């Protein structure tokens, strides 16, 4: 397991544990049902926001990795063919337009 996967896994478990702990604490707290439901709703909204932020970071990182891979493939193709990067990019643009 690489460092990024490990980080995201730990973050997920932390969020899940937080939600579980907060839910148990709210259910056992001596407050009215309405107040408890409101607090649980807020906790759920906060957790959903944190999950969306995590998803956005994962998607952004995936895009960065994809861009880096495209860059490395371009460089490798240029090195293998002995041509400059302009020719490789020109062929890709020409292929994309057809």
Image: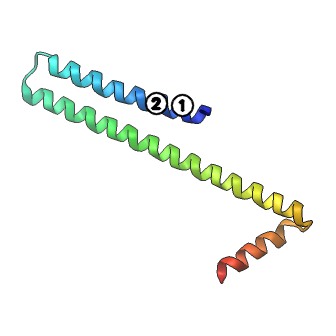
Helix or strand or loop: what does disc 1 sit on?
helix
Q: Is residue 5 left or right of residue 37?
A: right
Asked which quadrant contains residue 20, the reply is top left
Residue 2 % position (x, y): 62, 34
Relative to 76, residue 31 above or below = above
The disc placed on residue 11 is 2
Residue position for label 1: 7
Residue 65 % position (x, y): 64, 49
Q: How is the image coloured?
A: rainbow
Foreground pick, 6 / 57: 6
Residue at the (12%, 27%) spot, across then down: 35
The disc placed on residue 22 is none
Relative to 12, residue 84 above or below = below
Foreground pick, 50 / 14: 14
Q: Alpha carbon of mark 1 to alpha carbon of mark 2: how far?
A: 6 Å
The residue sitting at the right extreme is: 82
Asked which quadrant contains residue 14, the reply is top left
Asked which quadrant contains residue 22, the reply is top left
Q: Is residue 62 left or right of residue 77?
A: left
Residue 31 % position (x, y): 10, 20
Helix or strand or loop: what does disc 2 sit on?
helix
The residue sitting at the front extreme is: 1
Residue at the (64%, 54%) spot, across then down: 66
What is the quadrant of the N terminus in the image? top right
């Amino acid at each position: 397991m690489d460092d990024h996967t490990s980080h995201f896994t730990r973050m997920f478990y932390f969020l899940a544990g937080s939600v579980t702990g907060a839910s148990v604490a709210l259910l056992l707290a001596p407050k009215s049902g309405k107040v408890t439901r409101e607090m649980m709703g807020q906790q759920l909204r906060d957790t959903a926001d944190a999950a969306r932020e995590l998803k956005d970071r994962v998607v952004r990182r995936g895009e960065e990795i994809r861009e880096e891979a495209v860059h490395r493939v371009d460089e490798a193709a240029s090195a293998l063919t002995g041509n400059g990067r302009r020719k490789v990019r020109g062929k890709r643009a020409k292929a994309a337009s057809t």
